[in-house]
Amino acid sequence: VMANGLVALARGDGEVEEKQRVDLGKLLRRLCDECGAKLRVDGDAVVLGRPVALTRAFGNLIDNAIRYGHTARIRVTGREKEVLIEIEDDGPGIPPERLGHMFEPFVRGDSSRSSETGGAGLGLSIARQIIRAHGGAIDMANLETRGLRVSIVLPRGREGEENAAGQEKNSL
């Protein structure tokens, strides 16, 4: 698992995949159905992106929410030029002094959980790399009472950015 994560991180996972129209609502519905997470989609959630890479990024984020927060609630909001995705959990959150380092490779929220929950501390680094490669931004913050919120903003992209005219109909 760690070797696969290192390879994905090193090669900038998904950069060879061609961009196409991706319905994030459908992509996230599939991921949520597989793990029992809750999903709410408000508005159009189509972006220009690499579906395999985006699936990996969101899969890592949802897996973390369930692993450390025991639940995942995903809210997708389509805006005019971007799509906002928020993933919340009910876990203990991240100590405030560690929040700024969580997207670095091999950093874990609580190193004492390592033997209990597994993981090499690469999932967030890979997710950030994929989101940034799509021109997006990712951030995390503790919720007021308990839990963590990861917020992702992805630009919709422009129609002319597809690598091939026929890609448009291959959306997820």
Image: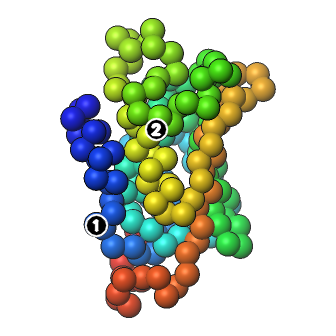
Q: Amino acid at mark 2?
A: Leu
Which numbered marker is on residue 161? Answer: none
Task: Identify which residue is drawn at 34% across, 54% down.
Answer: 12
Quadrant (top left/top right/bottom left/bottom right) for the C terminus? bottom left
Q: Is residue 118 above or below residue 7?
A: above
Quadrant (top left/top right/bottom left/bottom right) for the N terminus? top left
Q: Which residue is mark 1?
A: 16
Task: Identify which residue is drawn at 45% across, 26% down.
Answer: 107
Task: Identify which residue is drawn at 43% across, 54% down.
Answer: 130
Mark 2 or mark 1: which comes first in sequence?
1
Total labels: the figure holds 2
Where residue 15 sits in the image (x, y, percent)?
Answer: 33, 63
Q: Which residue is mark 2?
A: 124
Using residue 162 as the reference point, say whether residue 5 is left or right of it.
left
Dot 2 surroundings within 10 Å: few (below 14), some, or many (20 or more)? many
Q: Is residue 153 above or below residue 95?
A: below
Q: Residue 113: tell me if it is visible.
A: yes
Kindly report the distance in space between the C-alpha atoms of the residues bearing marks 2 and 1. Answer: 21 Å
